[in-house]
Image (spheres, grey):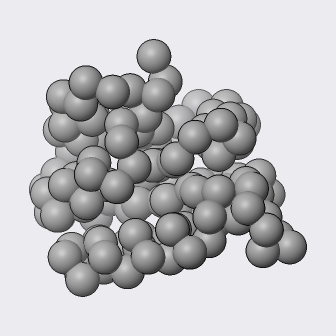
Amino acid sequence: MLNILIASHSKKLAEGLTELIGQMAGDVNIEYSGGTEDEELGSNFEEINEKMTRLAEDGLVVFFDLGSSMMNCETAYDMLDPKLQEKVILAGSPLVESSVQIAISITEDTSLDEIKEMVNKYDLNKLD
């Protein structure tokens, strides 16, 4: 089954969203990176990179809030082996709405192409 990674500047936001998704889509493995390693607002590249690398093998959808979280997710993605890149989707869609909707849609049979279609339906895409 596909994994989800939430990357946010705020640890509280990332924890809360992970908790919400966990209650609604309990079978989906979801992890987060929130704030800096000093627990300040910001983004932690090392943590994002480690989690993305570890979770990518089974398929991964990465959601992020803005700015350096987006940049760190893009950089971690670029550092992945090309075979792992094929298994990762960077979702530039709205963080809360799309991560919840997509998480509750994931089943054992959900493909990355189906997830890409869902992400592309959002009018707002931070990667455009």
> Residue at 27% across / 35% down in the picture?
119
> Residue at 65% across / 37% down in the picture?
67
> Percent x, y for residue 38?
86, 73
Q: Is residue 32 visible?
A: yes
- For this rendering, which residue is in front, 110 or 16? 16
Answer with left or right where residue 75 lies relative to residue 15.
right
> Percent x, y for residue 6?
49, 59
Is the residue 38 above or below the residue 42 in the image?
A: below
- The quarter of the displayed image where residue 122 is located: top left
- For this rendering, which residue is in front, 93 or 53? 93
The number of discs equals 0
Is the residue 50 above or below the residue 74 in the image?
A: below
- Image quadrant holding the C terminus, namely top left
> Percent x, y for residue 112?
28, 41
- The quarter of the displayed image where residue 1 is located: bottom left
> Residue at 38% across / 26% down in the picture?
125
Answer with left or right where residue 29 lies relative to residue 45.
left
- The quarter of the displayed image where residue 118 is located: top left
Q: Is residue 80 visible?
A: no
Is the residue 125 above or below the residue 9 in the image?
A: above
- For this rendering, which residue is in front, 48 or 39? 39
Answer with left or right where residue 52 lies relative to residue 111.
right
- For this rendering, which residue is in front, 35 or 80? 35
Farthest top residue?
A: 128
